Image: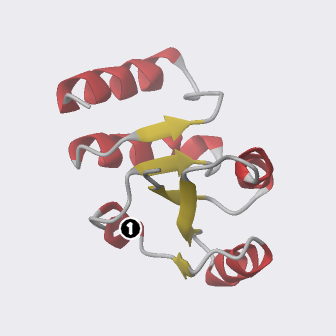
Amino acid sequence: MKVINIAMLGSGFVAEFYMQGLENVNGQRIVVNYSRAEERARKFARKWNIPEYATDLKAIIGRADVGLYLIAVPNEVHMPVALALAKARRHQVCTKPLARNRREAKQMLVAARTSGM
């Protein structure tokens, strides 16, 4: 079975739900947790046995070993993160609400379509 490496972008409430949902899913491995606060990233990674944590989003987006990015950051950060992932041609899943308004959602949709991913 092929295993997909996942980056969990966020370490709060929504990220906890993602982790609970993925707990019994075969073929996935969370390899890194991102948080804007190092302490939160470290605690989240320790709690869920994630081997790495980081506060440098650009470095995580640049990783060749990550096949899927789960966006679980606060709502106001969804759009810039989604746009950065689309620009880097990375597969991503974003929690709802997708964006804070129609304009942001449209930008995210256009970026995803343009990326070809």
Question: Residue 51, position in %: x, y?
Answer: 58, 80
How many discs appear?
1
Question: Residue 77, position in %: x, y?
Answer: 53, 47
* Residue drawn at x 55%, y 21% as measured from the top left: 101
Residue 111's place in the image compared with 92, above or below, is above
* Residue drawn at x 19%, y 26% as measured from the top left: 114
- Looking at the image, which residue sits at the far front? 1
Residue 65's place in the image compared with 4, above or below, is below
Colour mapping used in the image: secondary structure
Question: Residue 25, position in %: x, y?
Answer: 68, 46
- Name the residue type under label 1: Ile
- Residue 105 is left or right of residue 42, and the answer is left
* Residue drawn at x 62%, y 41% as measured from the top left: 75
Pointer 1: residues within 10 angstroms few (<14), some, or many (20+)? Answer: many
Q: Which structural element holds mark 1?
A: helix
Question: Residue 17, position in %: x, y?
Answer: 79, 47
Residue 97's place in the image compared with 12, above or below, is above
- Residue 89 is left or right of residue 101, and the answer is left
Foreground residue among 75 and 20: 20
Picture quarter with the C terminus: top left
* Residue drawn at x 51%, y 37% as measured from the top left: 93
Report which residue position mark 1 lands on.
60
